[in-house]
Image (cartoon, grey):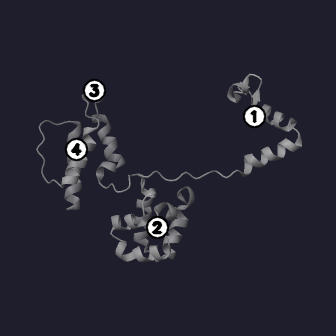
Amino acid sequence: AMDSAGPIDWSTALRGWTFADVLTAFEALPESLQQPLHAALTTAPKPVPPPAPWAVAGGSVSWLLDELGLSGLYGSTFAEYGVETVAQMLGPEGGDPSALIASLRELGVTRDHRDKIERLARSPRPCGASGGCFDRAFLAACRPLHAQHMGCENMGPLLYSLVRFTKARHVLEVGAGYTSVWILQALADNDAEL
């Protein structure tokens, strides 16, 4: 809406109004204006934002099955039924967990595999990332060790990634502090993986 001075700032114009005031003003509008407003407010579909590209839901089903070691068992079945993305598998807005389980059951996925697929599909960790540094408990334990004035807030994740990438089994660190727990977690993850 505009007046002679330009656009109306509705947040300022309605400051102090109660819900009853707004309802009274709405009811005072002509019926020809009330109906389209009511229809627009009650039936407008809410757009579903796509998953973030780094989220597991933004990845492919083939990646998810590879991550779980289940490609050989279910890869062709998912492909045959046209289930290509994790977001597609989860359904709109992340989907209903029971609907996902029922869908996986229809595809012939066993109970223990259904649980693994659902857990990873709904995981908050970045797609393609694995390891203990994405565990909430690990991150909570690291928080008290972080000292922003030390300038190493980005070094922990960097060293974790470097140790994981090189698949190191031993690391010589001079000194100990915030980065030590990241290096130790990477070594533990390498040991579990190898």
Mark 3 or mark 2: which is in front? 2
Label pair 3/2, CB-CB below 8 angstroms: no
Give the residue at x 27% y 26%.
149
Q: Secondary structure at mark 3?
A: helix
Q: Position of residue 59 (x, y in %)?
A: 42, 59
Could you tell which of marks 4 and 1 lies nearer the N-terminus? 1
Q: Give the CA separation, mark 2 to mark 4.
A: 34 Å
Which numbered tag is attached to residue 159?
4
Mark 1 or mark 2: which is in front? 2
Mark 2 closeness class: few <14, some 14–19, many ≥20 residues within 10 Å: some
Could you tell which of marks 2 and 4 lies nearer the N-terminus? 2
Q: Position of residue 87 (x, y in %)?
A: 49, 60
Q: Is residue 32 left or right of residue 136?
A: right
Q: Residue 155: in sight, yes or no?
A: yes
Q: Secondary structure at mark 4?
A: helix
Q: Which residue is mark 3?
A: 149
Q: Quadrant of residue 147?
A: top left
Q: Which quarter shows the N terminus?
A: top right
Mark 3 residue type = His
Q: Nearer the viewer, residue 161 or 105?
A: 161
Q: Quadrant of residue 154?
A: top left
Q: Give the CA separation, mark 3 to mark 2.
A: 46 Å
Q: Nearer the viewer, residue 1 or 171?
A: 1
Mark 4 closeness class: few <14, some 14–19, many ≥20 residues within 10 Å: some
Q: Secondary structure at mark 2?
A: loop
Q: Which residue is mark 1?
A: 19
Which numbered tag is attached to residue 84?
2
Could you tell which of marks 3 and 2 lies nearer the N-terminus? 2
Mark 3 closeness class: few <14, some 14–19, many ≥20 residues within 10 Å: few
Q: Position of residue 175 (x, y in %)?
A: 13, 35
